[in-house]
Image (cartoon, rainbow, N blue to C red):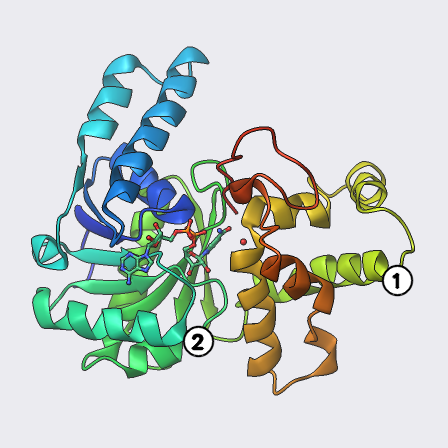
Amino acid sequence: MMGREVQRVGVIGAGAMGRGIAQVCAAAGCSVQLFDTAKEAVARARDAVGGDLARGVAKGRLSQEDADATLARIQPANELRDMSDCELLVEAIVEKLEVKQQLFRELEATVRPDCILATNTSSLSVTAIAAACEHPGRVAGWHFFNPVPRMRLVEVIQAPRTSAETVEALVELSTRVGHRAIVASDSPGFVVNHAGRAFVTEGLKLLSECVAEHSMLDAILRNCAGFRMGPFELLDLTGLDVSVPVMESIHAQYYGDDRYRPVTLARTRLMAGLLGRKSGQGFYSYGSRGGGAAP
Ligand code: NAI
């Protein structure tokens, strides 16, 4: 696999992240197959990508021909087997370890022996996902940020048994899709979601303790402290269905260390369905479903 340039990519999970990953890979010239257990999700994802590309054309960032060619390179896959010829499969499905492990077992049974298997997990152990596989050398984390076409950083996560060739191929592809890759060893939350814990957790604590309104806290951190968004804007963008499991997973992986203890308010709001942009109501209200992206 040394020096290899991946051209055929399969993306599993066509939600906020999967469609973004599909878009940047297709824009870089890769052929992309997109699979989701919810069939309508793939069509929705192609529509969203088409909409984003159209906005790019309107703003003069790319030509109509390039936009059409990018969209045409993203094709739906009806089943996992349809992606058996891919050189890289990346999953962006639900953030649950057993579900991801089961998927990777299924993938290993269908893919080429040299196919790289990557996970876009925000917070689960890449090592534990790889441990479910017969060939852990080809398994790595490839962790993008939301929205993928605009957040041009990606973490390439090397688990203890991930091969150097797998890491090299992912770094090479990351660069080709226009992202800056940082290689990090597998550890809870990797770099960004570990360092970012304090930002959202302390924001939630301030809100729980009624120190200030969420909009005030966001405004202070955005306007005075130089963050691009405040913690509640970020949580709404990400969706509590994604961020609460991330908080709980990092806390559990650090053996319950108090530094990472999630704030109960987040789970309460998750249970109430106040997910953020994607449900139309989070810390803020969104007129129509906000189609959010996000960690
Ligand atoms: P999402 O909820 O928008 O999309 C997930 C998609 O996966 C859905 O369309 C669902 O139907 C599909 N799916 C679920 N189980 C599946 C399975 N077994 N096989 C095939 N498809 C399946 O979620 P989102 O936000 O795109 O997150 C996906 C993954 O990316 C998660 O692991 C999350 O932690 C990670 N992530 C999320 C970020 C975010 O900001 N939302 C940022 C970075 C990583």
Kindly indicate the quadrant of the structure image that contains residue 62. top left
Identify which amino acid the numbered label 2 is placed on.
Answer: Ser
Give the residue at the far bottom of this rendering: 255
- Up the image or down, 288 lies above or below 116; here it is above
Q: Quadrant of ligand 1?
A: bottom left
Q: Reading the chain from its start, which is encountered first: label 2 or label 1?
A: 2
Q: Is residue 17 left or right of residue 42?
A: right
Kindly indicate the quadrant of the structure image that contains residue 166. bottom left
Instruction: Identify the residue at horizontal 15%, vertical 56% (top origin).
Output: 87
Q: Residue 115: x percent and y percent? A: 16, 63
Identify which amino acid the numbered label 1 is placed on.
Answer: Glu
Q: Nearer the viewer, residue 63 or 220?
A: 220
Q: Nearer the viewer, residue 288 or 25?
A: 288
In which quadrant will I find the N terminus? bottom left
Question: SS of the residue at dot 1?
Answer: loop
Question: SS of the residue at dot 2?
Answer: loop
Q: Residue 123: x percent and y percent? A: 50, 68
Instruction: Identify the residue at horizontal 73%, vertical 63% (top origin).
Output: 265
Crowdedness of circle 1 by 10 Å Cα count: few (<14), some, many (20+)? Answer: few
Badge number at residue 125: 2
Crowdedness of circle 2 by 10 Å Cα count: few (<14), some, many (20+)? Answer: many
Q: Residue 96: x percent and y percent? A: 41, 70
Instruction: Identify the residue at horizontal 28%, vertical 14% (top origin).
Output: 64
Badge number at residue 209: 1
Give the residue at the far right of this rendering: 211
Report whether the residue tagged 1 is closer than 8 Å to ligand 1.
no
Q: Residue 113: x percent and y percent? A: 9, 69
